[in-house]
Amino acid sequence: MSAVLTHSPHPPVRANAAFMLSHPAHAIALGFGSGLSPKAPGTVGSLWGWASWLLIQQQFSISSQALIIACAVLMGWWACTVTARRMGISDPGAIVWDEIVAMWLILFMLAPSGFATQLAAFVLFRFFDAVKPGPVAWADRLFKGFGWRGGWGILWDDLVAAFCTLLVIALWRIW
């Protein structure tokens, strides 16, 4: 029998460089520093995801890219779980691994694509992630709290936002 933790056993901790470097999970969850941005960390994390994807797609085969994304989701689940619990906040804004992985998934699914399509995908994803319309709001409420369920919840709403982004682009292309 497992209980869902609704509060952290740790007092709230502010994310900073020392915190990020204190555990590998924190470095991953905080997007290797992109989540430490004092303004719009989700946008900065998304931009980091976009920039890093440009390097990944040049260096790895399609199958390797898919494997990187799958591993990043699993590793991110662990990292987000550990970091949120240690920060004492169920879904801290400084955790941006969810935005990074979502951008990787979007750009992987859109490949090959030019700058205009990638920019549109970035803008759409930021809209869905920030405003959380319909299915994204549902996904955001589905998994709350601490522990593995909460860690998955941090990732889940961004994966749904990525799906919504891809759906809008697919409908735009059909139209």
Image (cartoon, helix red, strand yellow):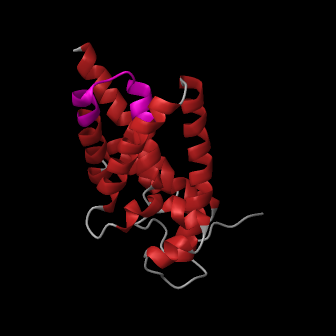
Residue shown at the point (33%, 35%) measured from the top left: 165
Question: Can you say whether 133 is above or below 95 in the image?
Answer: above
Q: Tell me the residue at 59%/30% (across/down).
A: 64
Residue 41 horizontal side relative to residue 153, left or right: left
As drawn, 119 above or below 87: above
Q: Kindly tell me whether residue 122 is visible in this rendering.
A: yes
Residue 15 located within the stretch drawn in magenta: no
Instruction: Tell which of 59 and 39 is nearer to you.
Output: 59
Q: Residue at 39% across / 32% down in the picture?
A: 107
Side of 78 relative to 111 (left or right):
right
Please provide percent x and percent y for residue 20: 50, 71
Q: From where the camera sits, is residue 6 visible?
A: no
Magenta residues: mostly which secondary structure? Answer: helix
- Relative depth, front residue between 154 and 45: 45
Q: Quadrant of residue 14?
A: bottom left
Give residue 45's position: percent from left, percent from top.
37, 54
Vertical relation: 7 (above or below) 134: below
- Quarter placement of the N terminus: bottom right
Question: Where, by quadrant of the figure, is residue 120 drawn?
Answer: top left
139 displayed left or right of 5: left
> Which segment did they paint magenta?
105-119
- In percent of width and height, residue 92 lies at 43, 68
Going 43% across and 27% down the picture, which residue do you hit?
A: 109
